Amino acid sequence: MGMDLVIDALCIRGLGPVRLTVPAGGCVGLSGPSGIGKSSLLRAVADMEPHEGRVRLGTMAREDLSASEWRRRVGMLPSESAWWNDGVGEHFLAPEKVRPSVLGLREEVLSWPVKRLSSGERQRLSLLRLLDREPLALLLDEPTANLDEVSTRQVEALILGYARERQVPVLWVGHGRAQLERVAQRVVSFDSEGCLRDADGEACR
Amino acid sequence: MNAVIALSPMDLSIAALLVVALAFLSFRMDLGVTRQIVVAALRTTLQLLLVGMVLKTLFDRAQPWMLAFIALVMVTTAGRVVMSRQTRQFTGIWGFGTGTAAMTVSSFSITCLVLTTVIRIDPWYAPQYAIPLLGMMLGNTMTGIAIGMERLTSTAWRDSGVIEGRLMLGQTWDEAIGTIRRESIRSAMIPTLNSMAVAGIVSLPGMMTGQILAGSPPMEAVKYQILIMFIISSGTGFGAVLAVSVGARRLFDERQRLRLDRLVGKKNEAR
């Protein structure tokens, strides 16, 4: 049931052309210094900015779906989470099914006002909110940036568990090499020319 | 209209003395607005005298094309004002076009409707009615649309993270901008709603005051004022809904991406 995320000839802001396949149930890590365009690649895959290239999920081509349908399937977690309602729970489609305790959060956190959340709580809740939409692929922009060691491990376990259970491809942006090697089967990065390379220096093709 | 007391230039200069006194006070207290007071007073005198002459000519022989020309000047000026009040305006024709088109559609259609069905003057474009009505419609619609558009573009700019966050969770552009659009339309309507709510208690509307000063029976003036209040608030409301909706759509492209590159910040020009 899982579907590969296939990126082909994608160019954005001097990056690429990027050619990359994230296999169903697998995780590809994208590392590199900040500012090199890791987030831009995720944004392009989620179709948040004008760019060149094609992306498909299994046999589903992006251009055959409306942008909102595509983004519902290919869920992106931005590095800064945004909250627009007053209450935390109002941001979830199925709040009764959410288990905050798996990320070390209190069960009643969904009844809290957003203003009360710390940055770490926001970050973890934004992941729960994304998974609540049950996406078929995950684009994660530094999902553990504001978290301590314990929470980081919990977040990693949740993501990898979701990916394995539903055979969902995961493209994970991070700048800690150690973390990416822990969660991903393959780690790629952009070189100074904007060409995507594997850990052994081979250009991705 | 038999009780009109004509004002002589002498009468006006007494009032002008007050403005001169104010300018002098501003100069002595170093308020920094002396120049503005003088310039504004001169502008109001000149502009209104000019309009008076134009209206006099127009009233003497009503030609539809002259009326159309005046209306065009009024709309373009109002459109430029709407645009100049935005801290971030849409690029290209959309900057001027969105507000102006919405203003035109709403003011013109309501003014024409009122002229043909309510006032029923013959010919319907009789300038004594058409020009002041259109002027009042445009003036208020202009303010409303300017407020609404400013709110829309500045909030979208500031809260782009929220809009994009909502898009990333699979919401449509319509859902993602919904809250901001609603708030913008509401803020555009509030001034006219407020003025309707306090009319007669806190403020005596200018038009009504003018009519009464010029000798109209108060009840006639009041009825006209009620008419004006109704059409101004509906015109402002419809115009704002139209302008803000078109603007909100323009913030997104065909792939429902937030396109802030379609807005340009104003180059530090004085307002």
Image (spheres, rainbow, N blue to C red):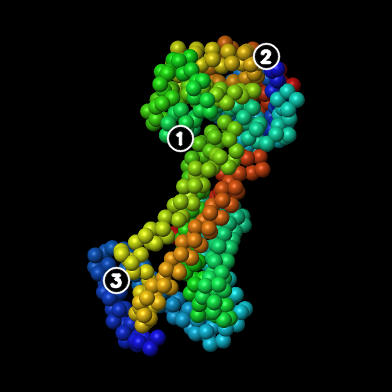
Q: Dot 1: few (<14), some (14–19), or many (≥20) neighbours within 10 Å?
A: few
Name the residue carrying label 1: A85
Q: CA distance from mark 1 to mark 2?
A: 46 Å
To which residue does mark 2 refer? Answer: A200
Report if the CB atoms under discs 1 and 2 are less than 8 Å apart: no
Label annotation for residue B23: 3
Q: Mark 1 vs mark 2: tell me if same chain.
A: yes
Chain designation of label 3: B
Q: Amino acid at mark 1?
A: Asn
User: Residue A157: x, y in percent?
Assistant: 54, 12
Crowding at mark 3 (Cα within 10 Å: few <14, some 14-19, many 20+): many
| Pointers 1 and 3 within a single chain | no
Q: Are marks 1 and 3 in contact (CB under 8 Å)?
A: no
The residue closer to the viewer here, A50 or B134, is B134
- Name the residue located 41 percent from the left edge and 58 percent from the top edge: B193
Query: Which mark lies nearer to you, 1 or 2?
Result: 1
Which residue shows up at 41% across the image and 26% down it?
A111
Disc 1 to disc 3, how far (Cα)?
Answer: 50 Å
Residue B216 falls left or right of residue B239: left
| SS at badge 3 | helix
Q: Residue at x 44, y 59 (%)?
A: B270
Chain of the residue that carries numbered disc 2 in the rendered image? A
